[in-house]
Image: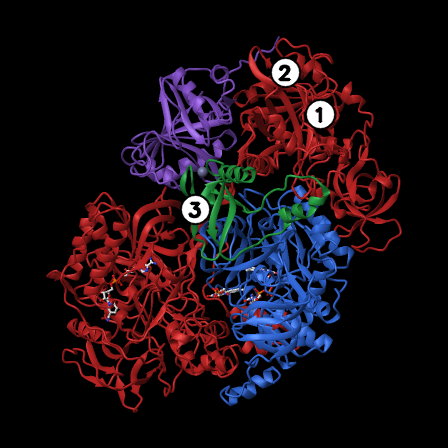
Chain colours: A red, B purple, C blue, D green
């Protein structure tokens, strides 16, 4: 069917033709069309099916509020479900499919649900599907789930890019209709920084859709001139195709810019959408008002539309929604539609006005006053209307207007409730937000002159507050009167009427909810699902409130609205994620030895944000165990080198540096000699161990602290807190130098001769460089370095820090120097094996619930000074006998492999969590000892060395016996350390 | 003494990453140009307790400009002090080896400030061009409009989940410094965001 | 009237005009044996079990808003019993057992759906931690499975296995975990309690607690004074305020947690999945929306709404976990106020005031606890002593140093 | 939410982390008799609905700890102060 495209007028470009398909069928349209207008122009009215009853549905609205005409758009990774046909701009090659129907949109089996409509009332599922019990998950729920949802989404990744950006302005103007343009002009002319945002593809708001006159020209021309002037002002930024979706604390707004949704695919280098965080000093909400449907029988049949939508389709999109129109209204604005359509040559049969004393101008169109449409009669499309006095009028389209609701959403996102106004029969914005005010019909100013004036005045006031001088200069215009008498629900209709279209909520559902006790609007919403669909009740909520009010015997004001929440219109996940997807989800941090490690064939592992070398397989090795065994052996027997640059490093200076450390660590640091390192333990204020590390004294007032990799940032923040908030009187300065220093451990019997070859002018013997020596030296002929004789591996070992830009080169130099000794790079796996062999505690034991004593470090807790955590550490529960403490663990049968995460049970106990004696925190295959061994936290463990326990690893179904032992599995006398 | 043949020189973390050339949209002049400022000498200078005024005087005596105020930079003859926290500054020098700058400041301000060499710890990226501001606004919440920021400003902020020291050096010219370990990732983000404008790496 | 398909059919013939209200709207009596403050899940469940298990029916539940307007009505509906510590595991497992028979018990379909809860792990230490947790569960006969990468891929092939910043290495699965229709729980308990004689009084805000000689006398409300012999506080996020009326300062802070739902789509994912390296968990509701959430906003709050940084943070993690989710649209976000305790575990206990009982500290995991919490609290109130299941949830455990800290982050409520 | 850092100016909350109640004071004595004060300091919170002073850390900026005066019900912020200044002022009060 053709002939719905008006011959002239409208904001479409007839010189260009765009091809598109809907459900596989080809159509054409023009630039300036939306998918909805192009479909209507092609005579397609049936665009979707409803949620529950699969009712055939067409377009109701012309913009963001559309609940019915939702389609699946695009293909592959770009497929989107539930796109509103009314807002998607037509582009060449557009492919859309209808959804929630089977086998086809025209013939949808699901429509038989309608037959059971008398059972499928609000909340029926809460009362049924309970017997037999097992049927719910096996049969009922899967059925319900398949029926639920609308469009189907893809599991493929999206090929498009997304961006984020921050915006700043003095005045944010949301909406570019007469109120918004007037606001932007006023503020823009004052010199204030203005951001004018509108979700439409073009600026102008209702002026694009209406026949109005401003300042002697058409509203459209006035808008064009205003936009041109705004575009010429350097202090004004215009953002069409952008929706402000949320208002947040501090006058921060979230907005979504649809940079490339109006094309088939974004051009290379451009994002599809951009997510904006806008910090506005002031904001004016000029979001307009939304027309309401009237609830009567068949008010959902394709061909029944909002009067204003029909006007928009005619005036803006040059599309007649039908050939013969009945207007049904309770206010003046229905007349506008009738007149505009008539002027466009569309036949308007009659205006049915529920008001007896209506006084609006009908331009010769017959008016039936005080009459009511009870039903739209229809097959799949309207064939006529029946009035409540049984008069039948033939028509193919019904334009309805139930009055207007200001779009107050953003004003209510911070919790304020809108206020009912009897005269306008609408909820108006709440007062009280000085930084965000409404203007124009968003503020209930339904006349054009008021919109222009309010826009200018509110903007002038807002920028005036900020110190700009603005003049509210308001053009003259002609007003259309707006008067309304409420009519919510035509009770004597025969057919099904709908309050919430998408969720198929009928006006009978609301009184039922009230009768059953769900009489607060919030309970009724949840029980009936009114307002919970993708349109969030933009059209239906006020009708629902009014119907519920009547059923509950309360006023509309008493019932009030449900809570307005972000998002004004739904926002794609990808837009919030922006560029931080895939491997860019979080930043990757590389150590200064990364290139060297890569050369050595390292396999990297994610440790927090860092990439660390976990092991260095030779080409001949497969798996991880072989290289790790080889690396451990090399470090134990010859010499190994390991990248430990990820340790947190903090330079601590100042007259009170020693005192500061003394308060942070539970052990003493005041007496540490210059040139010496000490192992330190920090507690949290609640007495639990927070972190450990080695800290060295480089000068009386200068320390070099290290932290664990995992806690580096946390410790820095903790120190800042302790200094700034607790002890600002201390003269101490500290700064993270983690990234300044590349740090490597060189360990093994041949560590000393290896390093000796690269250091300048130091003899690395036990006299100048004894165990725990820590000195600033130079290496390789002048590179500043710090050398520490400390050991995590238990071997005679050093840690060497060099400035990071030299890291790779120094590592290579050490490799060269150690070549003759068989130097081998080792990774964090080998490091971990050696620390487990030596019983050194790490992440698995420092797990946020262990005390110093649990870790076997109780004697480090000084009794001579105050330090963080001292008092709380003394509580009964933290010092109780029977706490789980660190022990060693090894399998009884040395061929067995124990695994971390296994629990320990008394040898003859049956499994029970209460009977768990503890669990294994870390394991390693010890090439040194030739079996798997580990550390565990075990109740009363220090008294139980030698006891055989049952290892419970039910989740992997592995069970064995193991022996509790000293955590120090290897070289108990620390001979190798001091060798 | 070393008996090794490896030539020791500073290697930037972005040495293999910041490849010269023109990238992204290729119409018209590039919206921004990037360059890595390396080798740079950077020292964190933190005034000791109650010594900020004395420190400022000492800086002025030595370099003939006072310490910058909160959120500002001050410089002369290739040495700049940038505010980067309470009583805390990045001293950045051109043409002076890193160890040299560190020793100089440490000796000069003995008892007045604590100095830590950061020359290797941070990577400085220069961003210049008409789109520099728009580009940086994709990362920093700081208002970079001329009425709020401008040449001579210095701020600590966060971009793309990474801490950034941001200074403006000219009308359309900025410098960003980030921790070395993040620099490669940050570079990837920054250049990708510049694709729509077209960018040149110098 | 019992709910069933028969009663539904019968009523459909009479135009659904004859349904009895699910609960009455009574005026408060002068005095009750027990008053429960808070008509959320825990308060209503407490009243239900007081009546059902202990025969105490002269009970009122006072709710300052509408029924279920608190966290019961705004959570992400995840239930599970995959806890680690001795104090928690038996309690949550008991709760799961109660969920499993709940709907038949209170004759209301709350859509308990044991679709499984899958926690992903991304590193060896995380796998070990999950092994420890899974083993803790198995020790008490609770179901748990440790899946490797391939097994996870089989269950959820759409997760980000390629090009991920943090590779998915496997997951801990509890098949008996799942989701429950949140509102249905409140309504089911309310109806069940009402049928047994409990007065549920909405729009009744408790503004004061009257205590004489160390014993509770009653409460001041906006509907006047109401006397009681025993008073149970189950005010969740508002506990600080209510407890202060009895002169108590608690180891609790109120924080806002946001949650989200997407537009409805056809079945997209089956199980509840939680990300191991970002704050994101998701399930699909029976209506088709993806219901998801993440971490707290972090600042103390009594406003039931949050801010954008958390929205971004959660959704970045979401797309990182499920790349295909990109074009699905997020429909609505909201917030609830969490009673975050100092060790992340709840408090169900008597107090220093005779007849005053405390139920709080649920952090953001108290929905799954609803049945057991009500059951244990009812026991504690009725018998004036804790049941073995809630004995570890003593109020004095902080002072004495017996914290139950699953996350190991200590006395920092916003980190639990 | 915007926090006005006394040094960096208004910045969005994503640059900050929050620790919590800034009205509590760390006791100075290690005498066992002061255990109640310690317990109070570490564990008990007024948790008010309304105006509240709390610690925020400008970790994404100048790294200052701030005391933010904020309403927990409206999220309105009345003022911010550097924690070091707040503590020094408090110490002075205590000493005089
Ligand atoms: C976004 C979000 C997601 C969550 N997700 C999960 C999840 O997936 N799984 C899970 O297990 N848990 C989850 N939770 C936590 C869970 O919802 C809560 O822990 C639990 O609901 C709290 O118990 P409740 O139901 O009794 O609380 P509420 O429903 O909050 O009940 C407390 C009631 O007390 C009332 N009240 C307060 N003060 C007074 C007064 N003075 N007088 C009268 N009445 C008063 C309140 O109005 C409220 O209705 C989530 C919470 C939120 C907010
Ligand atoms: N009787 C009637 O027909 C009737 C009723 C009410 C209003 N009106 C007329 O409508 C006009 C109203 O002017 P106005 O300026 O107040 O509103 P408007 O409707 O002209 O403009 C509002 C604009 O705000 C945009 N918008 C809404 N929410 C947005 C968001 N969250 N983000 C971005 N953009 C958003 C819309 O796209 C629209 O362009 C007046 O001329 C008035 O007379 C007529
Ligand atoms: C599990 C769950 C699913 C929800 N699904 C929807 C939904 O499909 N549509 C909708 O509008 N809101 C949905 N909501 C959100 C509610 O509308 C509401 O925002 C939430 O319960 C908090 O209440 P409030 O916004 O009235 O404060 C859902 C909430 C929950 C907890
Ligand atoms: Zn700051």
The residue nearer to you, when weighing C360 against A775, is C360
What chain does mark 3 sit on? D
Q: CA distance from mark 3 to mark 2?
A: 60 Å
Q: Residue at x 27, y 79 (%)?
A: A329
Residue that mark 1 sits on:
A791
Q: Residue furthest front?
A: D96
Q: CA distance from mark 2 to mark 1?
A: 22 Å
For ligand 4, give the image quadrant: top left
Quadrant where the C terminus of chain A is found in the figure? top right
What chain does mark 1 sit on? A
CB-based contact (under 8 Å), mark 2 and mark 1? no
Res C21 → quadrant:
bottom right
Q: Is ligand 4 less than 8 Å from the beta carbon at label 2?
A: no
Q: Position of residue C48 (x, y in %)?
A: 66, 74
CB-based contact (under 8 Å), mark 3 and mark 1? no
Q: Can residue C403 be seen at all in this image of the molecule?
A: no
Q: Position of residue A822 (x, y in %)?
A: 70, 18
Badge 1 marks a residue whose secondary structure is loop
The residue nearer to you, when weighing D87 against A145, is D87
Badge 2 marks a residue whose secondary structure is helix
Q: Position of residue A937 (x, y in %)?
A: 77, 43
Residue that mark 3 sits on:
D79
Q: Position of residue A435 (x, y in %)?
A: 34, 54
The residue nearer to you, when weighing B156 against A96, is B156
Res A26 → quadrant:
bottom left
**Total residue callouts:** 3
Q: Which of the two discs, 2 and 1, sits closer to the camera?
A: 1
Whether labels 3 and 2 belong to a single chain: the reply is no
Instruction: Residue A816: give its label.
Output: 2
Q: Residue at x 62, y 26 (%)?
A: A658
Q: Which of the two discs, 3 and 1, sits closer to the camera?
A: 3
What chain does mark 2 sit on? A
């Amino acid at each position: 069917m053709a002939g719905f495209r008006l011959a002239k007028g409208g904001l479409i470009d007839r010189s260009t033709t765009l091809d598109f398909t809907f459900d596989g069928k080809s159509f054409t349209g023009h630039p300036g069309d939306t998918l909805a207008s192009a479909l209507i122009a092609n005579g397609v009215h049936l665009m979707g099916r409803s949620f529950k009853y699969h009712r055939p549905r067409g377009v109701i609205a012309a913009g963001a509020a559309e609940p019915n005409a939702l389609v699946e758009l695009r293909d592959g990774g770009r497929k989107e479900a539930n796109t509103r046909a009314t807002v998607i701009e037509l582009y060449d090659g557009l492919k859309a499919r209808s959804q929630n129907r089977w086998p086809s949109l025209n013939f949808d089996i699901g429509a038989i649900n309608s037959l059971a409509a008398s059972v499928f009332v609000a909340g029926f599922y809460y009362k049924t599907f309970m017997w037999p019990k097992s049927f719910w998950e096996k049969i009922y729920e899967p059925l319900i789930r398949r029926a639920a949802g609308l469009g189907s989404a893809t599991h493929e990744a999206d090929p498009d890019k997304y961006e984020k950006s921050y915006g700043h302005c003095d005045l944010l103007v949301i909406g570019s209709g007469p109120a918004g343009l007037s606001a932007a002009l006023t503020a823009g002319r004052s010199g204030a920084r203005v951001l004018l945002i509108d979700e439409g593809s073009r600026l102008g708001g209702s002026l694009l859709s209406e026949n109005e006159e401003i300042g002697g020209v058409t509203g459209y021309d006035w808008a064009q001139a205003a936009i041109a002037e705004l575009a010429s002002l350097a202090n004004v930024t215009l953002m069409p195709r952008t929706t402000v979706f949320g208002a947040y604390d501090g006058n921060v707004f979230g907005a979504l810019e649809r940079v490339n949704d109006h094309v088939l695919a974004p051009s290379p280098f451009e994002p599809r959408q951009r997510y904006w965080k806008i910090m506005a000093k002031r904001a004016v909400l000029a979001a307009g008002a939304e027309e309401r449907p009237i609830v009567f029988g068949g008010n959902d049949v394709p061909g029944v539309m909002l009067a204003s939508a029909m006007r928009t389709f005619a005036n803006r999109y040059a599309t007649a929604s039908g050939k013969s129109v009945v207007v049904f209204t309770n206010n003046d604005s229905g007349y506008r539609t009738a007149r505009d359509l008539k002027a466009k040559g569309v036949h308007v049969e009659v205006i049915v006005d529920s008001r007896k004393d209506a006084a609006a101008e009908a331009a010769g169109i017959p008016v039936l006053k005080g009459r009511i449409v009870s039903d739209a009669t229809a097959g799949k499309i309207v064939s006529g209307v029946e009035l409540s006095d049984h008069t039948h009028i033939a028509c193919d389209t019904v334009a309805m207007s139930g009055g207007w609701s200001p779009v107050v959403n953003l004003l209510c996102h911070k919790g304020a409730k809108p206020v009912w106004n009897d005269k306008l029969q609408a909820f108006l914005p709440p007062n009280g937000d000085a930084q965000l005010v409404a203007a124009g019909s968003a503020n209930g100013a339904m006349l054009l002159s008021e919109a222009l004036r309010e826009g200018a005045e509110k903007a002038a006031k807002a920028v005036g507050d900020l110190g700009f001088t603005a003049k509210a200069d308001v053009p003259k215009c002609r007003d259309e009167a707006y008067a309304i008498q409420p009519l919510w629900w035509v009770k004597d209709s025969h057919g099904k009427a709908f309050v919430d279209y998408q969720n198929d909520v009928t006006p009978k559902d609301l009184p039922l909810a009230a009768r059953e006790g769900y009489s607060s609007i919030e309970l009724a919403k949840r029980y009936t699902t009114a307002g919970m669909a993708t349109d969030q009740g933009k059209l239906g909520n006020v009708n629902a409130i009014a119907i519920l009010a009547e059923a509950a015997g309360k006023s509309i004001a008493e019932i009030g609205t449900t809570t307005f929440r972000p998002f004004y219109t739904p926002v794609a996940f990808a837009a919030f994620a922006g560029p931080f997807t895939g491997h860019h989800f979080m930043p990757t941090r590389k150590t200064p030895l990364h290139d060297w490690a890569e050369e050595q064939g390292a396999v990297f592992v994610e440790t927090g944000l860092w990439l660390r070398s976990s092991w260095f397989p030779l080409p001949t090795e497969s798996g991880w165990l072989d290289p790790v065994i080889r690396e451990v052996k090399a470090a134990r027997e010859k010499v190994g080198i390991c990248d430990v640059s990820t340790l947190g490093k903090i330079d601590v200076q100042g007259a009170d540096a020693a005192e500061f450390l003394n308060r942070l660590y539970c052990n003493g640091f005041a007496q540490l000699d210059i040139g010496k390192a000490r192992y330190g333990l920090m507690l949290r204020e609640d007495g639990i161990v927070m972190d450990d590390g080695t800290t060295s004294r480089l000068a009386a007032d200068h320390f070099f602290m290290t932290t664990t990799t995992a806690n580096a940032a946390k410790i820095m923040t903790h120190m800042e807190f302790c200094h700034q908030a607790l002890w600002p009187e201390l003269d101490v300065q500290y700064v993270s130098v983690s990234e300044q220093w590349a740090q490597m451990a060189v360990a093994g019997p041949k560590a000393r001769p290896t390093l000796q070859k690269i250091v300048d002018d130091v003899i690395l013997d036990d006299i100048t460089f004894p165990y725990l020596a820590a000195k600033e030296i130079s290496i390789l002929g002048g590179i500043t370095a710090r050398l520490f004789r400390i050991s995590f591996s238990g071997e005679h070992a050093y840690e060497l820090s060099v400035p990071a830009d030299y890291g790779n080169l120094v590592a290579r130099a050490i490799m060269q120097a150690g070549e003759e000794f068989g130097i081998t790079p080792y990774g964090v796996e080998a490091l971990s094996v050696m620390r487990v062999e030596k019983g050194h505690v790490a992440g698995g034991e420092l797990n946020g619930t262990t005390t110093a004593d649990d870790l076997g470090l109780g004697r480090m807790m000084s009794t001579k000074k105050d330090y963080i955590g001292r008092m709380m550490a003394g509580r009964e529960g933290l010092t109780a006998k029977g706490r789980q403490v660190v022990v060693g663990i090894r399998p009884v049968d040395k061929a067995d492999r124990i695994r971390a995460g296994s629990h320990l049970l008394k040898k003859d106990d049956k499994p029970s969590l209460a009977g768990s004696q503890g669990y294994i925190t870390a394991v390693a295959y010890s090439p040194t000892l030739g079996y798997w061994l580990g550390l565990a936290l075990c109740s009363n463990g220090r008294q139980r060395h030698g006891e055989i326990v049952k290892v419970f690893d039910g989740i992997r179904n592995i069970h064995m016996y193991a022996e509790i032992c000293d955590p120090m599995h290897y070289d108990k006398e620390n001979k190798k350390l001091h060798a | 003494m070393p008996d090794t043949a490896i030539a020791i020189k500073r290697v930037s973390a972005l040495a293999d990453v910041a490849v010269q050339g023109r990238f992204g949209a290729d119409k018209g002049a590039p919206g921004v140009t990037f360059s890595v400022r390396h080798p740079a000498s950077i020292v964190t200078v933190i005034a000791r307790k109650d010594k900020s005024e004395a420190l400022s005087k000492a800086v002025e005596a030595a370099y003939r400009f006072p310490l910058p105020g909160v959120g500002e930079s001050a410089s002369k003859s290739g040495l700049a002090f940038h505010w980067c926290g309470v009583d805390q500054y990045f001293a950045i020098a051109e043409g002076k080896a890193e160890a040299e700058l560190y020793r100089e400041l440490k000796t000069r301000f003995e008892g007045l400030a604590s100095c830590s060499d950061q020359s290797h710890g941070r990577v400085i990226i220069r961003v210049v061009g008409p789109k520099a501001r728009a580009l940086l606004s994709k990362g920093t919440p700081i208002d970079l409009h001329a009425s709020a920021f401008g040449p001579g400003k210095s701020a600590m902020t966060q971009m793309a989940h990474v801490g950034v020291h941001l200074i403006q050096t000219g009308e359309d010219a900025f410098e960003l410094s980030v921790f070395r370990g993040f620099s490669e990732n940050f570079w990837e983000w920054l250049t990708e965001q510049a694709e729509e404008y077209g960018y040149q790496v110098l | 009237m019992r709910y069933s398909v028969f009663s539904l059919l019968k009523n459909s013939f009479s135009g659904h005009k004859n349904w009895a209200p699910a609960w009455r709207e009574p005026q408060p009596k002068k005095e009750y044996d027990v008053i429960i403050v808070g008509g959320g899940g825990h308060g209503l469940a407490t009243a239900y079990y007081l009546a059902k298990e202990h025969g105490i029916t002269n009970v009122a539940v006072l709710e300052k808003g509408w029924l279920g307007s608190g966290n019961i009505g705004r959570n992400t509906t995840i239930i599970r019993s995959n806890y680690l510590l001795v104090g928690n595991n038996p309690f949550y497992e008991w709760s799961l057992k109660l969920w499993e028979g709940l709907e038949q018990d209170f004759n209301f379909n709350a859509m308990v759906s044991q679709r499984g809860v899958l926690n992903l792990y991304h590193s060896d230490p995380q796998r070990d931690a999950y092994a420890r947790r899974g083993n803790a569960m198995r020790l008490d006969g609770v179901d748990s499975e440790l899946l490797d990468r391939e097994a996870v891929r089989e269950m959820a092939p759409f997760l980000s296995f390629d090009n991920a910043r943090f590779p998915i290495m496997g997951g801990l699965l509890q098949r008996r975990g799942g989701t429950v229709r949140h509102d249905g729980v409140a309504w089911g308990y309310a109806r069940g309690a009402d049928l047994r004689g409990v007065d549920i009084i909405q729009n009744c805000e408790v503004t004061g607690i009257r205590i004489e000689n160390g014993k509770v006398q009653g409460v001041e409300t906006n509907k006047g004074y109401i006397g009681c012999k025993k008073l149970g506080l189950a005010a969740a996020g508002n506990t600080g305020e209510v407890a202060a009326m009895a002169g108590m300062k608690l180891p609790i802070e109120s924080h806002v947690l946001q949650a989200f739902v997407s537009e409805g789509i056809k079945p997209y994912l089956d199980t509840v999945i939680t990300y191991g390296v970002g704050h994101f968990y998701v399930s699909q509701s029976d209506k088709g929306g993806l219901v998801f959430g993440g971490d707290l906003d972090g600042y103390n709050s009594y406003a039931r709404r949050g801010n954008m940084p958390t929205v971004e943070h959660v959704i970045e993690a979401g797309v990182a976990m499920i790349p295909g989710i990109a074009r699905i649209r997020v429909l609505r976000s909201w917030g609830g106020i969490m009673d975050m305790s100092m060790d992340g575990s709840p408090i169900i206990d008597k107090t220093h005031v005779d007849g005053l009982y405390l139920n709080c500290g649920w952090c953001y995991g108290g929905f799954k606890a609803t049945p057991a919490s009500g059951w244990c609290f009812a026991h504690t109130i009725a018998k004036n002593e804790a049941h073995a299941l809630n004995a570890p949830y003593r109020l004095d455990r902080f002072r004495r140093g017996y914290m139950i800290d699953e996350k190991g982050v200590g006395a920092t409520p916003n980190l639990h | 939410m915007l926090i006005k850092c006394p040094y960096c100016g208004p910045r969005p909350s994503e640059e900050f982390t929050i620790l919590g109640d800034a009205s509590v004071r760390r006791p100075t004595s290690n005498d066992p008799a002061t255990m109640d004060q310690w317990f109070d300091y570490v564990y008990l919170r007024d948790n008010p609905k309304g105006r509240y002073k709390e610690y925020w850390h400008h970790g994404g900026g100048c790294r200052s700890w701030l005391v933010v005066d904020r309403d927990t019900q409206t999220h309105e912020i009345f003022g911010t102060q550097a924690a070091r200044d707040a503590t020094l002022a408090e110490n002075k009060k205590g000493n005089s």
